[in-house]
Image (tube, rainbow, N blue to C red):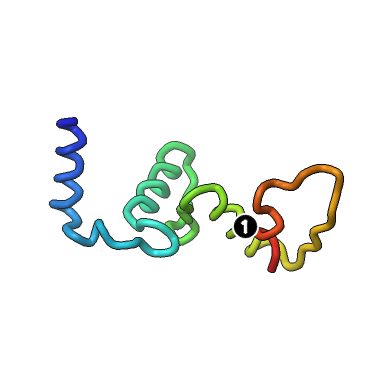
Amino acid sequence: MTELKAATAKVFDTMGRDVLQYSTSEGFTGLREIIARRYHERQNLDIPVEDILITNGSQQGLDLMGKTFIMKVTISSSKSRPISGQSRLFSL
């Protein structure tokens, strides 16, 4: 518990009350910078921060991929059950 309190205090000391605000749509810039740096250090990949997107769960990630890569989708009925929410997720 002591470490959690110290980490929380450090975040508030560094970022102040801004830490309580919603981040940008792309995700927290500081975390995106850490991810880009880590890819460079560990895999020698230069990935621009602008190309890194942090999602808030798998549904958001699937939604963004669908909107980005699928122009038009026709969902038809089949014998197998679809993933929960799939019809809503890919309806445009």
Estimate the x, y position of residue 73 in percent, counting from the top left.
77, 63
Three-letter code for the amino acid on which mark 1 is drawn: Met
Measured along the vertical axis of the image, is residue 41 above or below residue 56?
Answer: above
Q: Quadrant of residue 92?
A: bottom right
Expressed as whole percent of the image width and height from the top left, the position of residue 60 reads 54, 55
Mark 1 Cα within 10 Å, few/some/many (few <14, many 20+)?
A: few
In the image, 88 versus 59, the foreground residue is 88
Q: Quadrant of residue 28?
A: bottom left
Using residue 23 as the reference point, say whether residue 75 is left or right of it. right
Residue depicted at 17% across the width and 52% down the height: 12
The residue nearer to you, when weighing 49 against 91, is 91
Residue 18 falls left or right of residue 77? left
Count of marks placed on residues: 1
Residue 8 in picture, x, y percent from top left: 19, 44
Which residue sits at x=49%, y=58%? 51
Instruction: Please tell me whether residue 4 is drawn above or below residue 66 in the rendered image.
Output: above
Mark 1 element type: helix
Q: Nearer the viewer, residue 44 or 75?
A: 75
Q: Residue at x 19, y 30 (%)?
A: 1
The residue sitting at 68% across, 53% down in the picture is 86
Image coordinates of residue 68 in percent, x first then y, are 63, 63
Q: Which residue is mark 1?
A: 65
Q: Quadrant of residue 23?
A: bottom left
